[in-house]
Amino acid sequence: MIQNIRQINQGAISIMPGAEPFFYKSGRVGCLLIHGISGSPQVFRSIGKYLSSEGVSALGVLLKGHGTRLEEMHSCTHEDWITSAMEGLTQLEKYCTRVFCAGLSMGGVLSLRLASLYPERVKGVITICTPYQLRALKFRLVPPMKYLIKKIAGRPPSINDPEAVEINYGAHSIPATHELIKLTALVRQDLPNIKQPALIFGARQDKTVDSRDAGLIYGQIGSDEKELIWLENSQHVAPLDYDRFQLQEKILEFIKGYS
C-alpha cells in the first residue's frame, strides 16, 4: 500500500511537485528516511519503494522549510528539523513495532540525534555522506554573513550519474546553514552515547562533505555493532547515484539483520 502524506508543519504552502513526503506501508518493521538540507524526500523515494517491496515499511519525511520555497528556510532552526524528524518517527510508530532511522547528509545528523534522544524507539541508525564537522573556512564566515545576505547560488548537482535528477532548491540559505553548523556540533557530543547498531556510508568522490567524516563518525559513535562502507562511484547524493543499488541492498540487509 502506497500513501503520499502531507505534514502539518508545511501548513498551506504549496509543495514542489515530486517533493512530497511519502509512506510506503509494508511490514511492521519500518525505516524513517530523512533528506538533507535544501533537499526533499524525493532523494529517498526509490529506496523507499525498494524497502517496501522487501517487507520494510518506509516513510520519507519532509523537513520544515523544505520542498516549498527557499525563503521558508531562512527562519527555520535546527530544533524545527529535529521536531519534523520526531513527527515522522511518531507517524511510523503508529504502524510499525520496530523502527530504524536513515538519513542523507543533514538527514544523517538528524538520524543520529533521534538515536541519541530515543534509544528505546530507534533500533538502528544509518548515515549516508553525513558531516561530522563543517570545518572549511567558508563555514566560519556563515555566522556574520547571515546578517548581510540570506542566500547564495548552489553548485552543480553532486551526482556522477548524468541521468539522475534531484529535487531541491538549487541554492543555499545562509541562516539555515548556520543552524546546520549548530546541529552538527550538538550531535558530535551525542556520538559516544549512541549504542544502537550503526551503518555508516561514505562516498569516495564526495565534494560536499569531507570524506574523512564517515570515519570520524564510525570512530566516535558508541555502538558496539557498527560498519563503515565506502561507496566508490558516487558523489554526495549517493541515493541517486551509481552506487544506489549497493546502498539500498546494504540498508535492507542491515535492517533485516537487526529485526
Image (cartoon, helix red, strand yellow):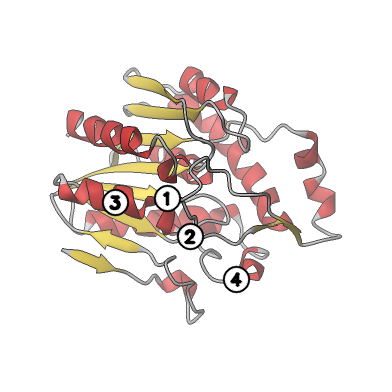
Q: Is residue 186 above or below residue 202?
A: below
Q: Distance between the Cα atoms at labels 4 and 2?
A: 13 Å
The residues tagged by marks 3 and 1 sit, at their Cα atoms, a distance apart of 11 Å
Q: Secondary structure at mark 3?
A: helix
Residue 44 in percent (x, y) is at 38, 51
Q: Residues under labels 3 and 4: Cα distance?
A: 24 Å
- Kindly state the secondary structure of the residue where label 1 is placed: strand
For the residues labelled 3 and 1, say whether their Cβ atoms are less than 8 Å apart.
no
Residue 169 occupies quadrant: bottom right
Sequence-first tag of 1 and 2: 1
The numbered mark, 2 or 3, whose residue comes first in the sequence reads: 3
Q: Which mark is residue 69?
A: 4
User: Furthest-front residue in view?
Assistant: 162
Identify which residue, 75 or 211, lies in the foreground: 211
Residue 100: horizontal and vertical position, in percent?
Answer: 29, 41
**Residue 48 has which mark?**
3
Q: Secondary structure at mark 2?
A: loop
For marks 3 and 4, the one nearer the N-term is 3
Residue positioned 78% across, 47% down in the render: 142
Q: Verify CB contact (< 8 Å) between mark 1 and mark 2.
A: yes
Disc 4 residue type (three-letter):
Arg
Q: Is residue 30 left or right of residue 18?
A: left
Of marks 3 and 1, the one in the foreground = 3
Residue placed under numbered mark 2 in the picture: 63
The residue depicted at 46 percent of the width and 39 percent of the height is 238
Separation (CA) of disc 4 from disc 1: 19 Å
Three-letter code for the amino acid on which mark 2 is drawn: Leu
